[in-house]
Image (cartoon, helix red, strand yellow):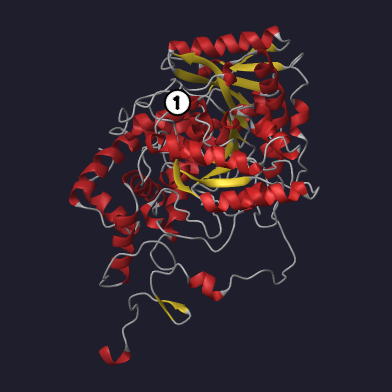
Amino acid sequence: MPITRKEVEEIALLARLALSEAEIDLYTRQLGDILGYIEKLRSLDTEGVEATTHAVPMDCTLREDELGERLPVEDALRAAPRRAENFFEVPRIIAAHDEE
Amino acid sequence: MNLCERSASELSALIARRQVSAREVTRAHLDRIATLDRELGCYLLVDQAGALARAEQIDGLIARGLDPGPLAGVPVALKDIFVTRGIETTCASRILKGWRPPYEGTPSHRLREAGAVLLGKLNMDEFAMGSSNENSGFGPVRNPWNRAYVPGGSSGGSAAAVAAGLCAAALGTDTGGSIRQPAALCGVVGLKPTYGRVSRYGVVAFASSLDQVGPLCRTVEDAALLLEVIAGPDPRDATSIAEPVPRYRDALGQGVAGLRLGIPKEYFVAGIEAEVEQAVRAAIRKLESLGARAVEVSLPHTEYGIAAYYILATAEASSNLARYDGVRFGHRAERPVDLLDMYCRTRAEGFGPEVKRRIMLGTYVLRAGYYEAYYGKAQKVRTLIRRDFARAFEQCDLIVTPTSPVAGFALGERTEDPLAMYLADVFTIACNLAGLPGLSLPCGMHGRLPIGLQLIGRPLDEATLFRAAGAYQAATDWHTRRPALG
């Protein structure tokens, strides 16, 4: 069995996905099938083969560091689920001092 | 004259010569969409007002003697993966429902600059993950040739809309076959250019080392025309290739005399439908009768392609899709208790089952201690696959294969078995892994369903694909067949 239910729960947390019990069962089975299929790569000898990161060799592209077009603040915030003044609003991350 | 059957090249010529107005052409397509698309499900959004306004603008330019560009008044549509300023862009995901982007991507910008009229945004598999279009968050697309069948995916809406005459041409994206496979299943021409040939600025990212933009059209000439318009370097995409863009249409009439066709023996094996193999072999004989020479070649690592692909693509997707966190745009879960809860519920509510499955797989293969065994290994296999092609291209000028092992499959047939769905991409994935250009064009029928022929070229040698495809199309009439629609 290539993947356990507990591993699926750990991965879901790493991936920031709140999965239902039924989804965890389903993915334990399906990821097991897919990982089982992927196992076939192990039989292939890749000793000494270099890795391909991009198929087409590319030089690192450089350009002058010049100020270009900027997205106006209002445009950037228009799609925000919640905003406060010129900020994206999210639930509190750091506890306030008086609560510590 | 049915305006919705004309090619993009014909329409732009007719409009530029004022034999028909851009407004009439746009109107005809909007009417056809209204009549047929309720059942087919190709469009996620139709911008009727914007399209008519743009068409009138084009007519105005022509009336004043100005040149509106090579796509003057041509009605086009975009897979909903292309970011369009002010026009809802969802990638067929509920997590992006209602998102109106504050900027325009390069491919759509270049189409508009060339005079095209944008009709709307097309359905797809959510975040381009799928081979049947059944993973859309907003409903499936039906194959215009047989409505019980899938159109292929992930650019299923693009292929079906072009086949059904609901636009003259469309853009799609191809990460593992997502332009070519639906083009084959819907009987149209689809091209995945060389990796880096077309800018991906403003294209929602799936797997960044594999994704590429390309056209879906009803003729090879249209595909060449659209590629001329959208290809070329872009300072906003550091992975775009600086090479100048040739006039691809010049290759169409050059014939195939002396061209060497590589036939990879690993692509004609068990699992391929008999009718598909027969049609592809007949197409090879046709090209030989036109002066090409077929040689057997070997791509020995073919059988490892899908396994390597599903490691690389899901790993990159799990990273790219981390941006959908409910903070800056898109869906956010109601009343989160804290930030972690907000992330986890936002993403669980917004993503569909296949996207979650791939994020999970990608997260698994990238987790601490697993990188070398999976991602690192897959990158090495990728090198072996690239070498296979480099060796094959010492003996041939292009490679000829089926695009899909089957002519089609029914809606619902593979949804319960993700692995069976992944195997639909068996003939298209290697192109992406090796960064090569690949083109699918119609080469036969299996009952009511079209069959696709795939041509694979050397890096940046799209011209040879157009040369062979143009010669084939000039000598056959498969591309002129149209589905019977209401």
Q: Is any part of residue B301 visible from this angle?
A: yes
Pick whichever, B359 or B129, lies toward us. B129
B232 up-or-down from B323: above or below: above
Relative to the observer, which residue lies in front, B431 or B221?
B221
- Residue B25 place in picture, x, y as percent: 61, 38
Quickly name the residue at label 1. Answer: B485
Give above or below for B9 relative to B259: below
Residue A15, image x and y in percent? 35, 56
Q: Position of residue B429 (x, y in %)?
A: 51, 32
At 37% across and 74% down in the image, what residue appears? A90
Residue occupying the point 54% across, 75% down: A73
Q: Nearer the viewer, residue B467 or B378?
A: B467
Q: Is residue B394 above or below residue B154?
A: above
The amino acid type, in three-letter code, at marker 1 is Leu
Left or right of residue A40: residue B110: right
Q: Residues within 10 Å of mark 1 (few under 14, many from 20)?
A: few
Q: Which residue in the rendered view is the most extreme toward the bottom?
A: A98
Which chain is mark 1 on?
A: B
For image coordinates 63% across by 8% down, the residue present is: B285
Q: Residue at x 56, y 59 (%)?
A: B85
Q: Quadrant of the N terminus of chain B?
A: top right
Pick out the residue farthest to the right: B65
Viewer-nearest residue: A64 or B3? B3
| Quarter of the image where the C terminus of chain B is located | top left
Residue B408: quadrant of the picture: top left
Q: Is residue B424 left or right of residue B291?
A: left
Q: Which element type, helix, strand or loop, lies under badge 1?
A: loop
